[in-house]
Amino acid sequence: MPEAPEVQTVLSTLEDQIKDLKIEECRIRYEKLIDHESVPSFIQKVRGQHLRQFQRYGKYLIFVLDTYDWIVHLRMEGKFYLLPDFPEDKHIHAGFLLSDGRWLCYHDTRKFGRMQLYLKQEDFQSLPCFQKLGPDVLDPSLNADYLYQMLHHSNKCLKACLLDQSIVAGIGNIYADEICFACRLDPRSRSKRISKQGCVHLVYHMQRIIQGAIRYGGTTIRSYTSSLGVTGRFQLKLRVHDRKDEACSVCHSIIKKIVVAQRGTYLCPKCQKRK
Ligand SMILES: [Zn+2]
């Protein structure tokens, strides 16, 4: 599942390649890909639009067109490719012919990804599809007071709260493990027991880790690779995630893998304290 850094890498790569190009033609092979409207209506609206801006909110991609905001969620396996044609491939569900002659193709083996169009908003955060999302992980307004309030109104464990997009948008399984490790907190900790100072550390490290991952182009572990052959190097920097039975880089204890919030979770049992 791509998290904020992988989504940002896809967007930045696409922005370099296709900014201001016009969508000449659109073909959709899988109807359920389009939310909230018919395929013919989506095609009619998107045709003739230019790709003006490339924005991210949490794990969502936002392509700002001339008169619409085009929202995409890649879910588990969605990917974009720029190809010379629109190939017969059962995993390619949509194609957009661009004014430079290339096709922007949407590939998704699991078919969970979704796209939708809205009339362009001054501030895309007000779009209906974002009403249940918390602030983006890199939003400057995200602070320890806010996080403390959210954690103290939750009965869930810390990791489940970090994964909850209605609290903070953009964190997934990999970075949740890294954030807990950096804060020396056991991911099973009751979120109500995290102190104000703990929340200061959480906000600091979540932003540091996500910024760092964006600089390194996301991570390529698991089945996710960013679009267009860009490979991430952040996996070299992961401290606990996917390091079962390796030595902790701080205390040399053996890193354990357990299940928390139904997700495979890695932690150092010595460094990370359970609250
Ligand atoms: Zn350790």
Image: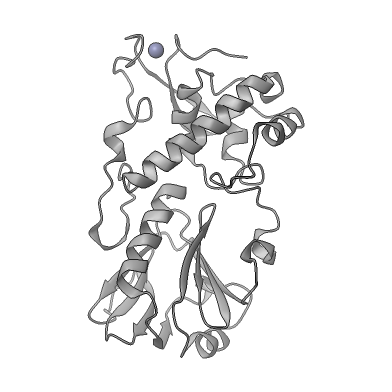
What sort of colour scheme is used for the picture? one colour
Ligand 1's image quarter is top left
At horizontal 49% and vertical 63% (from top left) the residue drawn is 55
Circle count = 0
Residue 254 placement (x, y as % from top left): 34, 12
Residue at the limit of the structure toward the right, as seen here: 153
Residue 154 placement (x, y as % from top left): 73, 31
Position of the C terminus, as image quadrant, is: top right
Query: In the displayed structure, would residue 219 be above or below residue 261?
Result: below
At horizontal 44% and vertical 29% (from top left) the residue drawn is 178
Residue 266 placement (x, y as % from top left): 42, 25
Is residue 29 visible to the viewer in this orientation of the structure? yes
> Is 213 left, or right, of 260 in this rendering?
left
Residue 271 placement (x, y as % from top left): 45, 12
Quadrant in the picture for residue 157: top right
Is residue 261 visible to the viewer in this orientation of the structure? no
Query: In the displayed structure, would residue 168 be above or below residue 80?
Result: above
At horizontal 51% and vertical 78% (from top left) the residue drawn is 65
Front-most of residues 74 and 48: 48
At horizontal 40% and vertical 62% (from top left) the residue drawn is 11
Residue at the limit of the structure toward the front, as seen here: 140
